[in-house]
Amino acid sequence: MLNKQAKSLYDLKKSNYLTNKNFFEKFLERLGKPFDDYLEINIKNSEFYTINYLDNHIGFFSILEEKYLTSFYIPDSLLSHGHEIFKLILSMFDVELMLVTSFDEISLCLVMDYVSKIKTHYIYFKLNSLPVRKAEYSSKNFRKAEIEDIPSIKKYTQNFIDGHEERILKNQLFILEDDNKSFLGLAVMIPHSIQKGICSFGIYVREESRNISVGRSMLLHITKEAEKMNYTPRCACPLSNDIYRKTLESGGFVSESRLFIAYLRQ
């Protein structure tokens, strides 16, 4: 039960990202690792709230669709207040879930103190420095998508992505073809907007072209494209997607962290 003294000490007010921008930058600095574009998009689409302590702005949290807690930050010097503030958030808002990375140790510890159910949502991968075998399909077969490719992209990838024209204009879509110019697969590079210099990948292989190293070849080629643009790739794979996980590992990526879903209401 939250005591009355806590309610008088802390004040949680709806605000916005810009009001909390300095704290958000400190939040990213404390994490020390990038998260993926999925979590970034969810945070960007969230409502931001300021955390005030004795009328001083000390941190923030964000909530998506009034249900999902997507970020939480208070400075290290005030971590002793973490439990009371977290309990206040749970008492004031009907949040059901929290998205929290394994390297957000403060939030993860608070979540683990109050929930009994937490599961892996995505496995995070980073590029390692070990050599890998060459791509089975040459880089000559890998190219930037053009506006004229949109009908083929929609035909073979269905609802994999949206905003095709905008992504093409921003040089985010790449196509792998065979020597006869037949469409084999699509690779997507998604630059992060909050985490500068970071990008995420998406890979889609045409159904008839699966299990012949098309995905692995696209991954190797789009990684080279990211390097040319001075991006550091951050790949995320659902826990259940063994095929994509093995593709990432064979393409020189290694799993080293997680994105969890914590169930806040039992």
Image (cartoon, rainbow, N blue to C red):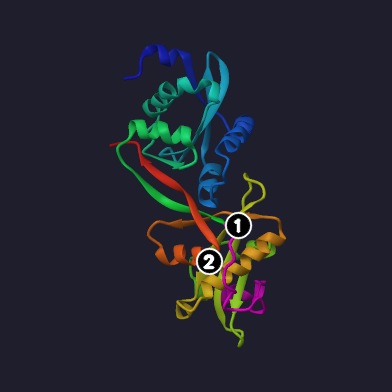
- Residue for badge 1: 190
Mark 2 is on which residue type?
Ile
Amino acid under label 1? Ile
Count of numbered labels shown in the rendering: 2
Q: Where is residue 215 shown, x and y percent of the image?
A: 52, 71
Snapshot quadrant of residue 162: bottom right
Is 149 situated left or right of 83 in this image? right
Q: As rendered, which of 157 and 199 lies closer to the eye?
A: 199
174 to 127, vertically: above or below: below
- Residue 30 magenta-highlighted: no
Q: Estimate the x, y position of residue 79 in percent, counting from the top left.
A: 49, 23
Describe the element under mark 2 as helix, strand or loop.
Answer: strand
Quarter of the image with the C terminus is top left
Q: Residue at x 59, y 68 (%)?
A: 220
Residue 93, horizontal then vertical, whole percent: 40, 30
The N terminus - image quarter: top left
Crowding at dot 1, Cα within 10 Å, few <14 / some 14-19 / many 20+, comes out as many
On whether residue 140 falls in the magenta region, the answer is yes
How far apart are the two marked residues, 1 and 2, measured between alpha carbons? 11 Å
* Secondary structure beneath label 1: strand
Instruction: Decide: is 38 above or below 264.
Output: below
Quadrant in which residue 229 is drawn: bottom right
Q: Name the residue under label 2.
A: 203
Q: Residue 235 carries which label?
A: none
Is residue 229 found left or right of 209 in the rendered image? right
Residue at 56% x, 60% y is: 201
Foreground pick, 28 / 98: 28
Q: Give the range drawn in magenta.
A: 128-154
